């Protein structure tokens, strides 16, 4: 199974894709980036609000250093999110992530990051050629 990725994001070479994500309250489309330098999946503050997750009331569980060098507060989210990906053949594939972090920074990058935890939990391989092709792959 292959899930094709886009390569360009805001004129930078960042592998990304549009996915549908659902909670018990909301179903939305989100642009997510694959970040192999990030060990945890981080839902952006903006995307958490879009999914009607009450991020403002959540406490900060840990802080990490963002790409800008600033410290970013993160809150644990354990209620689970369903991610729906469009495979190369056009069919839809569902993956559930039961544990992730939510950024508490409303002025942050505003893109959700799929970290290495997501790749490992779903047995996905990541292929990236900045000259033309990027995709996620899983043996089924």
Image (cartoon, rainbow, N blue to C red):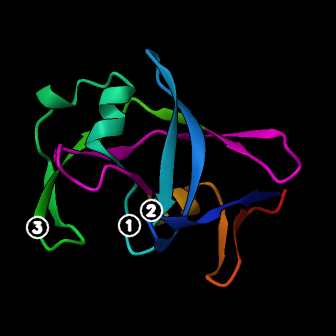
Nearer to me, 57 or 77: 57
Residue sitting at 44 percent across and 62 percent down? Answer: 115
**Is residue 125 on the magenta stretch?**
no
Nearer to me, 113 or 109: 109
Q: CA distance from mark 2 to mark 1?
A: 5 Å
97 above or below 14? above
Q: CA distance from mark 3 to mark 2?
A: 19 Å
What mark, if any, has residue 115 been given in the picture? Answer: 2
If the image is split into quadrants, where does the N terminus sit?
Answer: bottom right
- Describe the element under mark 3 as helix, strand or loop: loop
Residue contact between numbered discs 2 and 1, judged by CB atoms under 8 Å: yes
Residue sitting at 66 percent across and 61 percent down? Answer: 5
Q: Residue furthest front?
A: 11
**Is residue 85 on the magenta stretch?**
yes
Residue placed under numbered mark 1 in the picture? 39
- Describe the element under mark 2 as helix, strand or loop: loop
> What's the magenta region?
84-113
Q: Position of residue 50 (x, y in %)?
A: 37, 28
Residue contact between numbered discs 3 and 1, judged by CB atoms under 8 Å: no
């Amino acid at each position: 199974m292959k899930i094709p990725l886009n390569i360009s994001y805001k004129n930078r070479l960042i592998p990304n894709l549009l996915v549908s994500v659902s909670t018990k309250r909301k179903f939305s489309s989100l642009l997510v980036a694959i970040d192999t330098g990030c060990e945890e999946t981080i839902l952006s503050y903006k995307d958490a609000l879009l999914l009607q997750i009450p991020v403002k009331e959540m406490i900060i569980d840990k802080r990490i250093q963002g790409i800008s060098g600033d410290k970013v507060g993160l809150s644990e989210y354990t209620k689970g999110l369903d991610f729906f990906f469009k495979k190369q053949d056009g069919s839809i594939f569902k993956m559930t992530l039961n544990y992730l972090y939510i950024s508490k920074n409303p002025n942050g990058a505003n893109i959700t990051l799929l970290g290495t935890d997501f790749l490992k939990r779903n047995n996905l391989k990541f292929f990236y050629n900045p000259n033309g092709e990027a995709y996620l792959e899983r043996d089924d």
